[in-house]
């Protein structure tokens, strides 16, 4: 769920049938519901387009934009290859949207308004590098992520879509990434915590730790010099000295 402007936006139902709804964040009372949009693993976002705010949702089959009062503003097909489930959350920057989780690489769309309608135009496509069960991070004009099949860390130019570099080591296609200062911290599902530079020229790993013997699917929480991780069995607090 996403809480914004005293509302809680939720994706209801499953992958066969589903709906998007807005609830009053204080009372839980339903404000509106938009049927016919099967859910997936992606999280909804708020996108600002001029003075208007739009709810951006990646469903099982489409990328859709919804007004704050529940009107469908746009939808574009985002079919996935076999064994891909639109698990990645879109990356939003200004009027641009990056989608990368369909097993078809990475694509950049620009949202433009024509009269009362919104139009999405594809700006570029990189069929070689996309993600699966992780969401890329955008920093200083570049996208960093774990590629869809073997989990190799890569970097793309946000403006052109060109590949800047890709590391040779296979990690895991399940991963959580976040920017921390001048670095990126990545936690993979096989329990590897990796710290590497935000560097569009080459991959520079600064540290790598094994933090679990069991699978890790929860996003790590960083607070000061502490890192909280949750694997299948334990919640652990790590201190960085």
Image (cartoon, grey):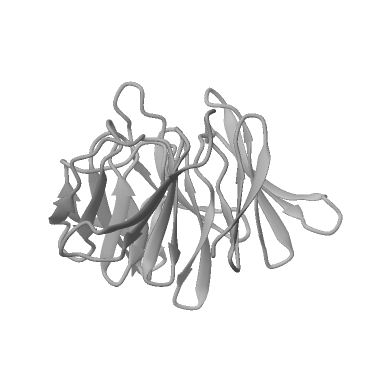
Viewer-side residue, 206 vs 14: 206
Q: Is residue 170 left or right of residue 6?
A: left
Viewer-side residue, 224 vs 79: 224
Q: Quadrant of residue 4?
A: bottom right
Q: Quadrant of residue 188?
A: top left
Viewer-side residue, 67 vs 6: 6
Q: Is residue 8 left or right of residue 192?
A: right
Q: Quadrant of residue 119?
A: bottom left
Horizontal and vertical percent position of residue 117:
39, 61
Residue at screen point 26% across, 41% down: 152
Q: Is residue 94 left or right of residue 32?
A: left
Residue at screen point 36% across, 22% down: 83
Residue at screen point 41% across, 51% down: 90
Residue at screen point 31% across, 45% down: 100
Horizontal and vertical percent position of residue 20:
61, 43
Residue most extreme to the bottom: 51
Q: Is residue 221 above or below residue 49?
A: above
| Residue 34 visible (yes or no) | no
Q: Is residue 189 above or below residue 209?
A: above
Horizontal and vertical percent position of residue 68:
60, 61
């Amino acid at each position: 769920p996403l809480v914004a402007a005293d509302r809680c936006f939720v994706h209801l139902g499953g992958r066969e049938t589903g709906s998007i709804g807005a609830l009053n964040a204080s009372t839980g009372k339903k404000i509106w519901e938009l049927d016919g949009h099967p859910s997936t693993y992606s999280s909804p976002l708020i996108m600002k387009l001029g003075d208007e705010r739009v709810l951006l949702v990646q469903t099982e089959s489409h990328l859709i934009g919804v007004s704050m009062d529940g009107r469908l503003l746009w939808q574009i097909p985002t079919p996935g290859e076999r064994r891909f489930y639109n698990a990645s959350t879109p990356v939003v920057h200004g009027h641009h949207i990056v989608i990368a989780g369909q097993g078809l690489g990475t694509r950049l769309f620009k949202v433009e308004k024509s009269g009362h309608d919104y139009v999405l135009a594809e700006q570029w496509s990189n069929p070689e590098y996309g993600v699966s069960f992780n969401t890329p991070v955008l920093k200083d004009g570049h996208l960093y992520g774990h590629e869809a099949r073997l989990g190799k860390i890569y970097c793309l130019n946000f403006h052109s879509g060109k590949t800047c570099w890709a590391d040779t080591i296979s990690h895991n296609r399940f991963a959580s990434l976040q920017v921390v200062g001048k670095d990126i911290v990545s936690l993979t599902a096989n329990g590897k915590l990796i710290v590497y530079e935000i560097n569009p020229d080459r991959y520079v790993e600064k540290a790598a730790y094994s933090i679990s013997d069991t699978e890790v699917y929860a996003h790590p929480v960083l607070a000061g010099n502490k890192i909280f991780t949750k694997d299948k069995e334990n919640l652990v607090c790590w201190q960085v000295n």
